[in-house]
Amino acid sequence: MSYVLRRVGQAVVVLLAAFTAAFVLLQAMPGDAVMIRFENPELGLSPEQIAALRATYGVDVPAHQQYAHTLLGFLSGDFGHSVQSGTAVRHLIAEALPGTLQLALLGFVTALVLATAVAFLSTYPRLAWIRGLLRSLPSLFVSVPVFWLGILLIQVFSFRLGLVPVINPGPVQGLVLPVLTLAVPISAPLAQILTRSIDEVYTQPFVTVVRAKGASRHWVLWRNVAKNALLPTLTMAGVLFGELIGGAVVTETVFGRAGIGRLTEQAVSNQDVAVLQAVVLLAATVFVLVNLVVDLLYPVLDPRLRNKSGASV
C-alpha cells in the first residue's frame, strides 16, 4: 500500500506541474483570445458588452485568480467554454476523443506487432543473412518524422499505387495509413530495446542450463528468454503509449481526420486558451496514468522487484 500511495502521489505532483506549466505558457501568449474573437467591427459590440464577455470567460481578473478558478474547474470536471464556438470544452473533448483513442490504440497494437516481429526475427540463425538489415530498421524508423512519413505513405499507396483512397475512404480504409504513420516511429524504440534485451538474456546462466538440458532454441526463446526480455520493453511501451496522443494530433492533421488533432489545430489558430489547456492536461493525464499502471504492474511481473518493494516498505 505504501508503494502504491507513493506512486499515486508522484502522479498527482506531475499532473499539477503539467497544469501549472501549461497555464503559465498559455498566459504568456501574445494577444487576447476574447478581444480577437469579439472586438470585430462587424459584430457591432459595445465596450460594455465586450467587458461583460471578458467577465463571463473569467479573463478580467488577475492571473493568480484565473489559475485558482481554472484549477478548481478542472478538478470538478469543468474545463470552461471555447471562445470560438461558445461550446463547453468538455463536450468538444468528448466528441473528439473517441476517434483519437481508436487511432492511438490501433497504432500502439500495430507498433507492438512490428517491434516484436523485427526483434524476434533478427535472433533466428536461419535469418543471419538479413539480421543486419532487421537490426538496422529500428534506427531508420526512429529517425522518420511523423508528418513526413504520412505524406510519403499517401504519395505511394494512394497516388502512385491507388491501393488506399484518401478522399472519402471507408471506415477501415481510412485507418490504414494513419495507423501505419503512427505505428512505425513508435515501433522503432520498442524493437531496439527488445532486441537488446533478448541478446542480454541469452547470455544469462539460466539459459545455458536450460539449453544443456536439451531444450531447443525455439523453446528457450519463447518459454524463457521472451518472458524476461519483455520486462524492460514494458516500461518503454508505457512511455510511448503516453506519447501517442501527441503523435495522433500530428497524424490527424496530415490525414484530415476528426479528433483531438483537428480540435487542437483550430484552438491554436484561434488562440482558444481553454481548449488548449484541456488538451494539454488530457495528454498529460494519459501519459501519467499509463506510466502509473506500468509502475504498479512491474513488481507483479518481476518477483525480484516485488521483493525489493516489500523490503523498502
Image: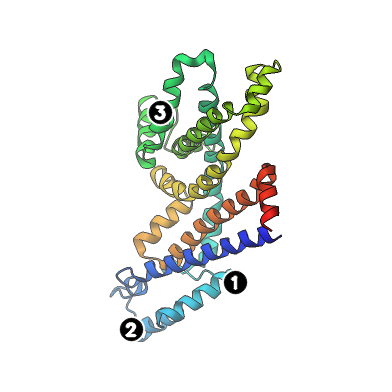
**Tag 2: Cα neighbours inside 10 Å, few (<14), some, or many (≥20)?**
few
C-alpha gap between disc 1 and disc 3: 46 Å
Of callouts 1 and 3, which one flags the residue occurring earlier in the amino acid sequence? 1
Classify the position of the N terminus by image quarter: bottom right
Count of labels shown? 3
Disc 2 residue type (three-letter): Ser
What residue is drawn where x is 44% and y is 46%? Answer: 247
Res 46 label? 2
Disc 3 residue type (three-letter): Phe
Q: Callout 2: helix, strand or loop? A: loop
Res 275 label? none
Q: Is residue 58 visible?
A: no
What residue is drawn where x is 53% and y is 13%? Answer: 126
- The reply to whether the C-beta atoms of the residues labelled 3 and 2 are less than 8 Å apart is no
Q: Callout 3: helix, strand or loop? A: helix
Residue designated by label 3? 157
Disc 1 residue type (three-letter): Ser
Q: Callout 1: helix, strand or loop? A: loop
Left or right relative to 36: residue 21: right
What residue is drawn where x is 51% and y is 30%? Answer: 195
Residue designated by label 1? 76
List the single residue furthest toward the bottom: 48
User: x, y (%) of residue 25?
Assistant: 37, 67
